[in-house]
Image (cartoon, helix red, strand yellow):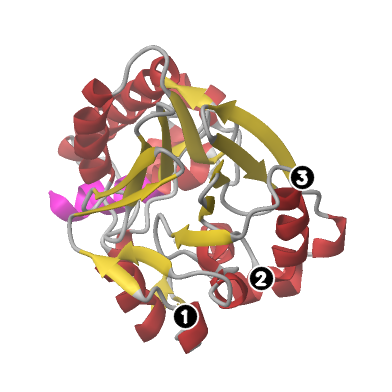
């Protein structure tokens, strides 16, 4: 494990640490219409999905607590209706950091493991995140699926196990034909897989292969990080994951060490995916750690 990899992982999962490292006063919350009743907000942290209509506002994820006032202002530019529900796609702090603020507006809904992980505290790559305050915890949890009937939508949260984490939910806005993928999709970049909290790249591939036929060419995908996406881009991402896993598995079967994998530039064919905080170097370490352990 490299120091840089540990630092990157900690930034992803620890909202408190990120808040100390970043000047949120400089963050701008941008609003983008997706389609139907759905919008996307981008700022710092995970992308926020928003459903608006006569019944009120539903938000999916809420970034960091210091950004809550800016998020509220962005929502007001879309609708003056109140927030009715908050959904969390998983427990990481860059997606749930605003829970402690927005829980005063509406109930938070998430998979059972989101509440469990937040309440118990977590450790990722040796970095500890303390238990979240009670106000930040989901008060409605589900095991497999949950549906909110609001704004003329059947908004379905479906749990897909052991992908990015063991707490992942993918959110389907069925009428608008929009899907919020959470961190089961990083647009045009390598993923972070939280191996210490139930994540698995092979599990992620299995989940994505199950989701793919549920989509059509008009479906819009909100990635956990990155630009608005679609079915074609999802297939490219799946192909990258499958290809890199296959090549890394082959190297491991041949007895290659991680150092040899790096020296031989085993994954260089996918270097164009080195677009986010998960560099090619870190992605190689992540893959090797999981696949070598399972061997």
Q: Does residue 201 appear left or right of residue 102 in this picture?
A: left
Q: Quadrant of the N terminus?
A: bottom left
For marks 2 and 1, the one nearer the N-term is 2
Q: Residues within 10 Å of mark 3 (few under 14, many from 20)?
A: few
Q: Which residue is mark 2?
A: 65
Q: Which residues are magenta?
A: 286-295
Q: Nearer the viewer, mark 2 or mark 1?
A: 2
Front-lying residue, 247 or 100: 100
Which is the main secondary structure of the residues drawn in magenta? helix
Residue at the extreme front:
54
Q: Nearer the viewer, mark 1 or mark 3?
A: 3
| Disc on res. 153 | none
The CA distance from mark 1 to mark 3 is: 37 Å
The CA distance from mark 2 to mark 3 is: 20 Å
Image position, residue 13 (x, y; %):
50, 66
Residue at the extreme left:
295
Q: Does residue 6 appear left or right of residue 153 in this picture?
A: right
Image position, residue 132 (x, y; %):
48, 83
Residue 31 visible to an observer of this rendering: yes
Q: Residue at x 87, y 56 (%)?
A: 26
Q: Residue at x 37, y 76 (%)?
A: 139
For marks 2 and 3, the one nearer the N-term is 2
| Disc on res. 128 | 1
Q: Residue at x 38, y 12 (%)?
A: 217
Image position, residue 267 (x, y; %):
41, 28
Does the magenta portion include 289? Answer: yes
| Disc on res. 77 | 3
Q: Where 224 falls versus 96 (above or below)?
A: above
Q: Does residue 31 appear left or right of residue 171 in this picture?
A: right
Front-lying residue, 115 or 202: 115
């Amino acid at each position: 494990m490299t120091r840089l990899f540990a630092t990157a992982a900690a930034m992803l999962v620890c909202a408190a640490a990120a808040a100390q490292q970043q000047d949120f006063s400089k963050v701008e919350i941008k609003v983008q219409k997706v389609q139907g009743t759905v919008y996307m907000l981008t700022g710092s942290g995970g992308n926020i999905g928003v459903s608006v209509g006569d019944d009120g506002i539903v938000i999916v994820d809420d970034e960091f607590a210091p950004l809550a006032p800016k998020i509220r202002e962005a929502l007001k530019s879309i609708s003056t209706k109140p927030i009715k529900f908050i959904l969390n796609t998983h427990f990481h702090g860059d997606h749930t950091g605003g829970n402690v603020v927005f829980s005063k507006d509406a109930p938070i809904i998430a998979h059972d493991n989101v509440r469990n992980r937040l309440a118990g505290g977590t450790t990722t790559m040796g970095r500890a995140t303390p238990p979240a305050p009670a106000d930040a915890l989901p008060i409605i949890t589900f095991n497999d699926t949950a549906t909110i009937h609001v704004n003329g939508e059947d908004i379905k949260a479906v749990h897909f196990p052991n992908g990015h984490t063991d707490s992942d939910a993918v959110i389907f806005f069925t009428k608008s034909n929009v899907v919020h993928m959470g961190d089961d999709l990083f647009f045009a970049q390598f993923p972070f897989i939280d191996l210490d909290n139930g994540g698995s790249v092979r599990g992620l591939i299995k989940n994505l292969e199950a989701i793919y036929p549920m989509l059509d060419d008009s479906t819009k995908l909100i990635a956990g990080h990155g630009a608005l996406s679609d079915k074609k881009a999802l297939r490219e991402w799946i192909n990258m994951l499958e290809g890199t896993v296959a090549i890394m598995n082959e190297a491991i079967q041949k007895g290659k060490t991680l150092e040899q994998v790096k020296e031989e530039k085993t994954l260089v064919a996918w270097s164009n995916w080195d677009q986010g905080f998960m560099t090619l170097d870190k992605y190689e370490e992540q893959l090797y750690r999981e696949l070598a352990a399972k061997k």
